[in-house]
Image (cartoon, grey):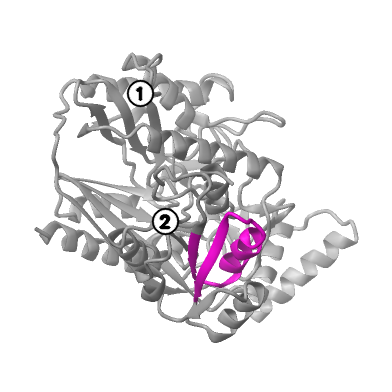
Amino acid sequence: MNRRDILKLGVLVPFLRTPAFGIDSMPRDRLLNVGIIGMGLRGRGILELIKDIKEINVVAVCDSVERRLKDSLQIYPSAKGCSDYRYVVEDPKINAVIIALPEVLHYPVAKDAVLAGKHIYIEKTMTHTHSGLNMRKVGPYHVGPMEGWMPDSYQNLVIEQSVAGAETAVANLKPAQIGWGQVDVPEHAHNRRFKMKKKAWKTPWGETEGVKSSPPLEHADILEPLGPTDPEVSFISVRSTDGTPIALFANYSSHYSADLPRPYLSADFYGAFAVQIRALLKAENQRIPFVGIMSHGTGGDQGSSDRRKSLQGSAFERPEQVGIDLAKAVYRTYGAVQHKSWVRLGAAQSSIKVNVRKGTPEELEYGAFLLDRHRQGLPFLNFVLEVPYARHLKRMDDFWPDQVDIPLSVFRIGDVAIAAIPFEVFVETGLSIKEKSPFPSTFTLGLANGSFGYLPTEGQHELKGYETWKALGSRVEKTAATKIEAEVLTLLSKIYEQN
């Protein structure tokens, strides 16, 4: 077994995750002594995968739930069981630690493992697209809590490529400098929620609303957008000490640019940006490949096109143009970036509980009625997606808890702060975090460390519209955005005050 096999085990997960830390070279014939922390569904799944690999010896398994611990020891009887993860981290016989805990616990456990000199295999979510195959679905179903599944062939392919990227990054570590900047690109920042003249837009439940998300282009009933826009592109640049570009990580608040017809796949403007910024920086033929990244910001209610006007270009051309425009804007600013060899770093993480918005008895009954109509082959009654919404409410009632833990993270890189929120965050929240942050520059990663759906503000919930409809796409309480923003600002203040 080689390092690649180990890494594959570390990223084999429903929500496309990759190792947070690399591993150094180890002799290929050396027995790898492993401890697993967290023996829930994921931890036991990993244990089942590695139990018959002769190059791996599981020394210890750890979980605070006694039943899980007993089940794990039945799978691997020679391992020692414990309820305190520090036993695993501090055991000198253990070379590597596999962390399969809830995400809010990743940082403290991983930190202790790093300080103890352990190799670490840990998992995080990666990305979001509407023009690709689904990384969080099995057939027609979104995976929910307490449900497990194994990746299909495409998901395994993405895992393989993620592993290759992690291996390449670790192999190419070198001294570097870092800098950052911001630039506005307003031509691709448009609120996509509109107030309409007529209250005639049906919900899956047969109600009518005067709000429409992404209405038909140039529709006569469009009155005005229902929220602000954020045109800012924030970026962090990394280069070698001789000035050679290594990577550029950017962030823009926008939905995808186009829905491509099947069977086409696309990285949308995110991929176009990565290609274009590499070309502009003349980093295409480097011995060590340059990495350009565009990330998803607070674009829950922002898109790249103005629905009040006709679209320019085809579904294939629009994402390309958006990516090119964003890359050119960043490049125009790039020359003024001050790259530094040392900057202050910081990080903080917490978790808050929010309530899940489950269906009322009346809504569940009506959903069952819609599903029964569907089974009879009858056409939709209210809205073309009423059957998926009815299924969502049923699955939430069957599988989801009444509350969920929301992991929130913030990071400091010099004078830049980055917040990570596991939702499609609305622009209003993103702008508020920027304004109230103690840092000179702040941006937010949406859909980070999880995917809990849209996060409308309380005011947007009152206006209604697609993003507020109760389902897996908008599953938490109406006050969640307010609570999450407050916690993020508390974390930002914490790392700002750190020495």
Which residue is the extreme one toward the left? 499
Q: Residue at x 33, y 30 (%)?
A: 247
Amino acid type at mark 1: Ala
Residue sitting farthest toward the front:
29
**Residue 204 visible, this angle:** no
Who is closer to the viewer here, 303 or 196?
Answer: 303
* Residue identified by numbered label 1: 327
According to the picture, the residue beneath numbered tag 2 turns out to be 120
Q: Please provide percent x and percent y for residue 476.
A: 49, 68
Q: Secondary structure at mark 2?
A: strand
- Asked whether 381 or 431 is in front, the reply is 431
Q: Which residues are magenta?
A: 33-62
Crowdedness near tag 1: few (<14), some (14–19) or many (≥20) residues, C-alpha within 10 Å: many
Please check the rendered image and state whether residue 50 is part of the magenta-colored stretch, yes or no: yes
Residue type at tag 2 = Ile
Q: Residue at x 40, y 39 (%)?
A: 295
Q: Earlier in the sequence, mark 2 or mark 1?
A: 2
The 10 Å Cα crowd at callout 2, few under 14, some 14 to 19, many 20 or more, is many
Q: Is residue 48 left or right of residue 464?
A: right
Residue shown at 69% from the left, 74% from the top? 364
Say if 358 sits above or below 317 in the image.
below
**Residue 268 highlighted magenta (yes or no):** no
